[in-house]
Image (tube, rainbow, N blue to C red):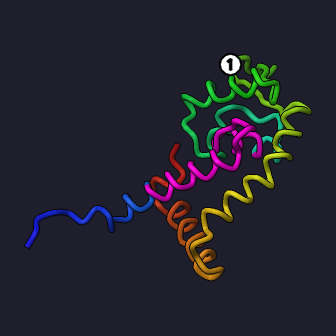
Amino acid sequence: MSNRFEFEQAPGHLIRRAHQISVAVFAEEVGAHTVTPVQFAILNALLEQSGIDQITLAQRVAFDAATIGSVIGRLERRGWLRRQPDQADRRRKLLWLTAEGEQAAAALKPVVETVQQRMLAPLSAQEQAQLTALLRKLVTHHPRGLAT
């Protein structure tokens, strides 16, 4: 009898491997756009609600609030968003998509939809729905699920 832990079957390992697959497929599909999943999430969140502050945005895309500024800086340098201090609290930075940022997000949306389809392709339609529902439940109800 082996004392070895069967990590290949452990949920944490399988989630990490699924994440690796997700990032690889994203990079393949997005290619020339040279955008990361987090950058797309930021663009998409700002499409939904412009003028929000960096902390709120970080929470919305489940990204570390302390390091989101550097990601925002890269998008700002590309001309896809603009950042300005809040008039009521100059320490607080508010964010808006530029016209170029809106165009980039619109161009990326079908590509990201293809990424999702490719990731789930090995599963039946029922399994895809089940996996998505279970992941949503894990993230929504886990005590660390909303932590960034």
Quadrant showing the N terminus: bottom left
Which amino acid type is shown beneath numbered disc 1?
Arg
Residue 40 figure quarter: top right
Give whichever of 21, 48 is nearer the camera.
Answer: 21
* Segment tinted magenta in the rendering: 17-44
Which residue shows up at 72% across the image and 24% down it? Answer: 93
How many tags in the picture? Answer: 1
Q: Is residue 115 visible?
A: yes
Q: Position of residue 62 (x, y in %)?
A: 59, 46
Q: Position of residue 42 (x, y in %)?
A: 71, 40
Q: Is residue 88 visible?
A: no
Q: Is residue 72 above or below residue 122?
A: above
Which residue shows up at 83% across the image and 32% down it? Answer: 96
Q: Judging from the image, what secondary structure is the residue with disc 1 in? A: loop
Residue 118 figure quarter: bottom right
What residue does disc 1 label? 91
Q: Is residue 49 left or right of residue 99?
A: left
For the view shown, which residue lies furthest in the left direction?
A: 1
Mainly helix, strand or loop, the magenta region?
Answer: helix
Give whichever of 29, 58 is nearer the camera.
Answer: 29
Q: Position of residue 22 (x, y in %)?
A: 57, 54
Q: Is residue 21 magenta?
A: yes
Give whichever of 33, 14 is nearer the camera.
Answer: 33
Residue 31 figure quarter: top right
Which residue shows up at 72% across the image and 53% down it? Answer: 112
Q: Is residue 96 magenta?
A: no
Crowding near pointer 1: few (<14 within 10 Å), some, many (20+)? few
